[in-house]
Amino acid sequence: MDRKLKIGFIGLGQRGAAYGMTDGSIGLLGNVLKNSDDAIVTVICDKYQERLDAAAKKIVEHGYDMPMQTQNYKDVMNAGIDAIIISTSWDMHVKVALEGMKAGIPVAMEVGGTHSIEDCWKLVDCYEETGTPIFFMENCCYNKDEALVTSLVRNGVLGELAYCQGYYCHDLREEIAGGIDTHHYRLKEYMEHNCENYPTHELGPIAKLLNITSGNRFTKLVSMASKAVGMKSYIAKNPKYSAPERLGNAEFKQGDVVTTMIQCENGETVFLKLDTTLPRLYERGLTASGTEGFYCQTTRAVILDDGTVDHEMTSYKDMFHTQDNYDRYLPDDWRTITPEQIKAGHGGMDYIMLKHFFRCLKGNKPMPIDVYDAVTWMCVTALSEQSIAQGCMPVEFPDFTRGKYKTRKTVDTMDYPVIKE
């Protein structure tokens, strides 16, 4: 398919179109417009008219025709489009995706967890019944650091992996409280649930490293939540939120720090941490520990068991940024990316992610993050909620592939180099 793909956009808030944000680079709409060789946005949908107006203005300012506008996502399915991008609130992701798949329209679905294992099975069943492609937009799988460690693992540099960890540490207190004015869905989520509510940024890249759903699977999970005091403290200190008629009397169920351990069938273990309602620096903390070496995203360090490092005496400070010595392992996407593409969204990973989605659609190729990956990562939210509610008891992982993980092959669309040293 050489022509440009016609895209329907559903959900035009902060993630969809950077509505109300000074930094437009976090919005997916801007990144689709940057991928102008591949796609054009012909239909936009949101339940708030002010968001529709802002998105339409942005599209026209980029030199495109005025898109069709609707507040009913079902209208998008009948608008002659080639694909749907879903960036609604978390609770609408599955509902809209199912509608698109049943209509035979390929779907790109934004990330987030789900509180319903039943919804996960609905996605799997719908895909297996319709064959409609669905792509899970976990942009961290396309980030430079994650691409590097994936290439190191694919090339055997770290040996056999035994343990991985990842964090979603992000001070979101203003975003959560601000939801009273911006309609941001996180406010309701943090008031009503206690779980690992945003697992896929840290877990997605780890699952790819461990070949989860393609020769390996998660088998068991245990989660634990701290007390919930961060949001109440933050609101009490902020006059714009502290009045009783605002959020002064609000109660929050979501623990400030949630930790999760996952067991894999092939023997590896995974540690996750969610930390979003206390003051701290942003950190994803991807770590991969293998028989031949160790990767740490926080320090940007690669430490190998090759005799060059004194593992007792060498300090972490000495190892800061040693991953820069391994740039030859980066895929072409990161070797050839331009400054403009890096600025397009989240340091370039949004641009690369969408480029791969469009490329797979045009070439009729399997999605690199497909429905089985999506539900396996998303369901951590539901399972962690169960584990916490049951006194931190272990919870079994469903096998959404129904045994196919034993023979499924990992799909890599990034061009990881093969390096022999």
Image (tube, helix red, strand yellow):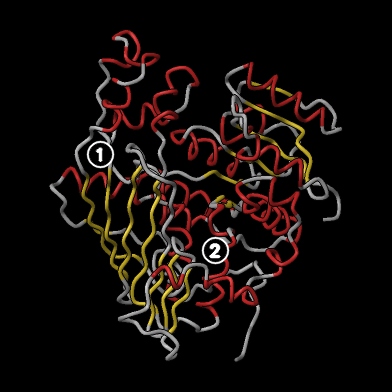
User: Are there few (<14), some (14-19), or many (20+) residues within 10 Å of tag 2?
Assistant: some
Drawn side of residue 247 relative to residue 344, left or right: left
**Residue drawn at the location 53% of the way across and 64% of the way down:** 146
User: Going by the picture, which residue comes out furthest to the top?
Assistant: 245
Where residue 276 sits, quadrant-wise, is top left
Where residue 365 sits, quadrant-wise, is bottom right
The N terminus: image quadrant: bottom right
User: Going by the picture, which residue comes out furthest to the left?
Assistant: 391
User: Are there few (<14), some (14-19), or many (20+) residues within 10 Å of tag 1?
Assistant: many
Q: Amino acid at mark 2?
A: Asp
Q: Nearer the viewer, residue 83 or 321?
A: 321
Drawn side of residue 77 relative to residue 392, left or right: right
The C terminus: image quadrant: bottom right
Q: Nearer the viewer, residue 56 or 24?
A: 24
Q: Amino acid at mark 1?
A: Gly
Q: According to the image, label 1 marks what residue?
A: 255
**Residue drawn at the location 47% of the way across and 70% of the way down:** 301
Where residue 132 appears, as percent x and y from the top left, is: 61, 51
**Residue drawn at the location 29% of the way across and 29% of the way down:** 192
**Residue drawn at the location 69% of the way across and 45% of the way down:** 344
Up/down of 159 relative to 53, above or below = below
Q: Nearer the viewer, residue 41 or 239?
A: 239
Up/down of 130 relative to 404, above or below = above
Q: Nearer the viewer, residue 85 or 247?
A: 247
Q: According to the image, label 2 marks what residue?
A: 145
